[in-house]
């Protein structure tokens, strides 16, 4: 089970923590506000009130064991930046940081942050999904219970037809499109890669290695198929 630390409990940070906990992960939350920590204490694995820019304080929570650190501090970019850099220095395997504008994105990229996100509750839901389900490339919520998702296929899918995979009967999801990269030889001999989209593929469509499936279904059914990949 992956271990996450979320720093900053604004709307985005709380939404992300709640989504990750619902998916059965281990979540540590950090914030300077004791009131916010008390609100989350019974919901997460561990909640601690501290200044995340305090290097000695960060040393007390065992960051070397953390797989992903997400810095959700929004109003104080200096604190966001310093915290992000400290997480990298302390050995957190993957650091994700929130940015509020183009300049913040540019600075975070310059210091080598692995992934940069923009705020919003739906963005928090998407991030939680992508962290827990490694094969998920993107997800868009159609309603409270239904979503469309792009997923990368496991090697076991290659060479099989959609009918053979029978994803609708097994998981309750529908494949509505397939994205496939094909090689195209130019006249000068240069090989280009071109994306081809097959909409509403039939049961006899054969899945190829590296295909991306676009699927629609209930979120609980999408969870099931993601866990099986």
Image: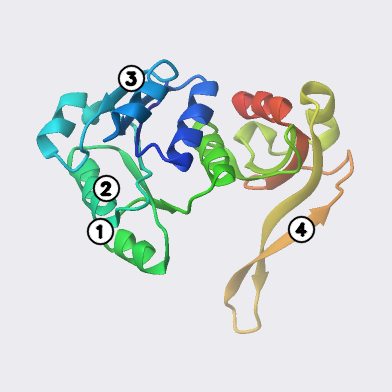
Q: CA distance from mark 2 to mark 1?
A: 9 Å
Is 9 left or right of 133, judged from the image as shown?
Answer: left
Q: Earlier in the sequence, mark 4 or mark 2?
A: 2
Q: CA distance from mark 1 to mark 4?
A: 36 Å
Q: CA distance from mark 3 to mark 1?
A: 28 Å
Q: Residue shown at 42%/64% (left/top)?
A: 101
Q: Quadrant of residue 193?
A: bottom right
Residue 59 visible, this angle = yes
Q: CA distance from mark 3 to mark 4?
A: 44 Å
Residue 37 higher or lower than 91, as above or below? above
Q: Residue shown at 29%/28% (left/top)?
A: 34
Question: Residue tagged by mark 3?
Answer: 46
Q: Earlier in the sequence, mark 1 or mark 4?
A: 1
Q: CA distance from mark 2 to mark 3?
A: 20 Å
Is 174 left or right of 187, judged from the image as shown?
Answer: right
Label 3 Cα neighbours within 10 Å, binned few <14 / some 14-19 / many ≥20: some
Q: Earlier in the sequence, mark 3 or mark 1?
A: 3
């Amino acid at each position: 089970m992956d271990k996450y630390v979320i720093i900053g409990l604004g709307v985005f940070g709380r939404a992300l923590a709640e989504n990750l906990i619902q998916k059965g992960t281990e979540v540590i939350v950090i914030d300077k506000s004791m009131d916010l920590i008390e609100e989350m204490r019974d919901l997460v694995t561990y909640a601690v009130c501290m200044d995340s820019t305090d290097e000695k304080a960060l040393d007390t929570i065992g960051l070397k064991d953390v797989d992903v650190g997400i810095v959700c501090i929004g109003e104080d970019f200096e604190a966001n930046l310093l915290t992000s850099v400290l997480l990298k220095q302390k050995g957190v395997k993957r650091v994700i940081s929130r940015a509020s504008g183009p300049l913040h994105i540019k600075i975070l990229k310059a210091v080598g942050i692995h992934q940069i996100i923009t705020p919003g509750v739906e963005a928090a839901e998407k991030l939680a999904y992508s962290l827990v389900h490694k094969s998920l490339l993107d997800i868009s919520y159609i309603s409270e219970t239904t979503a469309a998702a792009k997923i990368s296929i496991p090697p076991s899918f290659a060479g099989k037809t959609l009918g053979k995979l029978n994803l609708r009967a097994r998981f309750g999801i529908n494949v509505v499109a397939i994205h496939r990269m094909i090689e195209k030889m130019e006249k000068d001999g240069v090989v280009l890669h071109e994306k081809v989209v097959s909409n509403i593929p039939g049961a006899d469509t054969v899945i190829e290695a590296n295909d991306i499936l676009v699927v629609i279904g209930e979120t609980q059914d999408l969870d099931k198929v993601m866990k099986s990949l």
